[in-house]
Image (cartoon, grey):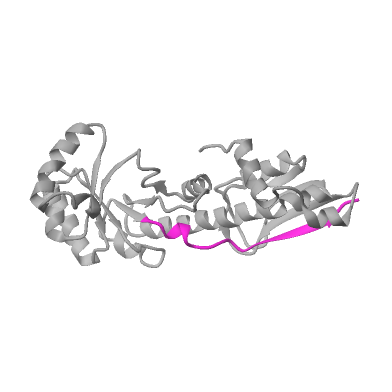
Amino acid sequence: MFDFTDNELLELLKEDVPFLDLTTYLQDINNKKARLEIYTREDIVVSCSEESARIAKLMNCEVDFFVPSKQKIKKGELILSFIGDYNLIHKIWRTTQLILEYSCKIATYTQNMKEEILKVNNHCELLTTRKTYPFAKKFCIKSILVGGAFPHRLNLSETVLLFPHHRKVYATSEEFYYQIKEIKQKALEKKIIIESSDFNDAINLMKYGADVLQLDKMDVKIIDEIVKYKNNNFPWIKLLVSGNINLLNIKNFASTQIDGVVSSSMYLCGMSDLGTGLTILE
């Protein structure tokens, strides 16, 4: 998939422990070992356990168990366990747990959305927006990949996507339509994606050469009509839907036989319910 550098993980830990763990410093406990176990209180898809385990190793802890990313586990099962100095265990406890709480929730929610799509549309892809948590994009992207989705856009340098705000520099819609050909010529290796919220506009965008249409906040009935028109006239064009799509309504949109569903809801789904246990070993 992709890897995090040790420096990235240590910087994450540094946010929580910029100097010292004042609480354990005041305890003044020396030469004590402990085991920390992180387990789940709900059924989840595991994500980013490798990163949590790596942080433990970087702090000279021995990882004696962890479940790899992509694995499904049940309520009550163990995700990660490591042994180390009592003070170091407390130093990394919350960071390792938080990585898992956020990442596993995103992966689980994403996989649930993907399963809803596949109930009604085998050729529809689940795509994710750029609305990741600030400073946590890599964790978010790894988690949606674990859950079976694919990034819609990783950054502005990667894809061409024209929103309604991009059209405001043109005097008329027709002026914009004629500009599509020139944009395609300049970016001849890229797909030209254009967002639309209107039936007639969507039809015109197909006629003027858009490669992909992103149908935003449209009624399912109108989307169904556009899909039928596209299939009959421009079968090579891809259609995406976007706008307030989540686990509860994604099946309705996918049932239109759309090519892809774009959503941010997996980044807004909260945290997995995980617990920890600490055992003093000596």
Vertical position of residue 23 compared to residue 19: above or below: below
Report if residue 169 is visible in the image: yes
x, y percentage for residue 141?
A: 48, 46
Q: Nearer the viewer, residue 193 or 126?
A: 193
- Name the residue: 40% across, 50% down: 130
x, y percentage for residue 194?
A: 22, 49
Q: Could you tell me how many numbered marks the image carries?
A: 0
Q: Is residue 133 shown in magenta?
A: no
Magenta-tinted stretch: 263-282
- Image position of 241 (left or right of 48): left
Q: Nearer the viewer, residue 119 or 247?
A: 247
x, y percentage for residue 203?
A: 12, 53
Q: Nearer the viewer, residue 237 or 207?
A: 207
x, y percentage for residue 220?
A: 24, 65
Please identify the quarter of the rendering in which residue 182 is found.
top left
Q: Is residue 265 shown in magenta?
A: yes
- Image position of 29 (left or right of 254): right
- Name the residue: 20% across, 66% down: 221
- Name the residue: 39% across, 63% down: 246
Q: Nearer the viewer, residue 88 or 166?
A: 166
